[in-house]
Amino acid sequence: MVDAARARKLADRIQQIVAEMLERRIKDPRLGFVTVTDTRITNDLRDATVYYTVYGSDGERAETAAALESAKGVIRSEVGRKTGVRHTPSITFVMDSLMENAAHIDDLLAKARAKDAEVAKAAQGASPAGEANPYREPAAPDAELDDADPGSDGHDAAGDGEDGRSGRPSS
């Protein structure tokens, strides 16, 4: 096995070489506006996968894929010449679906924003289903004093008046 840092450095170098070749040396008219987005290489340095995106329609993408496949041998020999590794890795070009995924996520986020706007619009004139304030609030300070007396529920417990006599309380 090869050191992961060495594999990453080789993958970065392959990415630079491929991008430079696509820009300067490969003159295929089928080649569209190509951007090399990433390169990954196996741990044994035998296979390199080059990810790319193409700006354009599906037809232009298909033509670019065909142009890359036909130029694969020239690109591989240039990679071998410029990297100096014992075994030049085989190169596979893979269309990176990053742009399509980003567009799909943008569409989903736009739908979520529209739904949130609908909910906010419906909630503007709404009122609570229950009481206006469903939470218990602390009692007034006067009520706390009455509640502090055990057995004090507002009634005379002994049944006699305030002055200790039975009957009606005095006013």
Image (cartoon, rainbow, N blue to C red):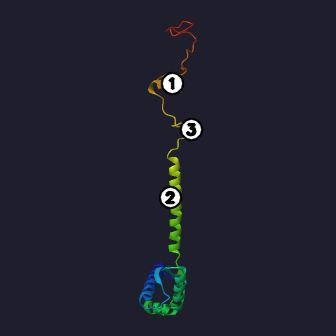
Q: Residue 113 carries which label?
A: 2
| Mark before the other along the chain sequence, 3 or 1 | 3
Question: Residue 121 at x, y = what percent?
Answer: 50, 50
Task: From the viewer's side, name the closer residue of 119 and 142.
Answer: 119
| Mark before the other along the chain sequence, 2 or 3 | 2
Residue pointed to by mark 1: 147
Residue 166 vertical position relative to residue 140 in the rendered view, above or below: above
Labelled pair 1, 2 in contact (Cβ < 8 Å): no
Name the kind of residue labelled 1 in the image: Asp
The span from disc 3 to disc 1 (Cα, nearest Å) is: 28 Å
Binning the other alpha carbons within 10 Å of mark 2 as few (below 14), some (14 to 19) or many (20 upward) gives few
Task: Name the residue rendered at 50%, 73% in the picture.
Answer: 99
Task: Name the residue rendered at 54%, 6% in the picture.
Answer: 165
Visible in this render: residue 24? Answer: yes
**Secondary structure of the residue carrying numbered label 1:** helix
Question: Residue 154 at x, y = what percent?
Answer: 54, 19
Name the kind of residue labelled 3 in the image: Gly
Name the kind of residue labelled 2 in the image: Arg
**Secondary structure of the residue carrying numbered label 2:** helix
Q: Which mark is residue 130?
A: 3
Binning the other alpha carbons within 10 Å of mark 1 as few (below 14), some (14 to 19) or many (20 upward) gives few
Q: In which quarter of the image is residue 94?
A: bottom right
Residue 125 vertical position relative to residue 158 in the rendered view, above or below: below
Question: Residue 124 at x, y = what percent?
Answer: 49, 46
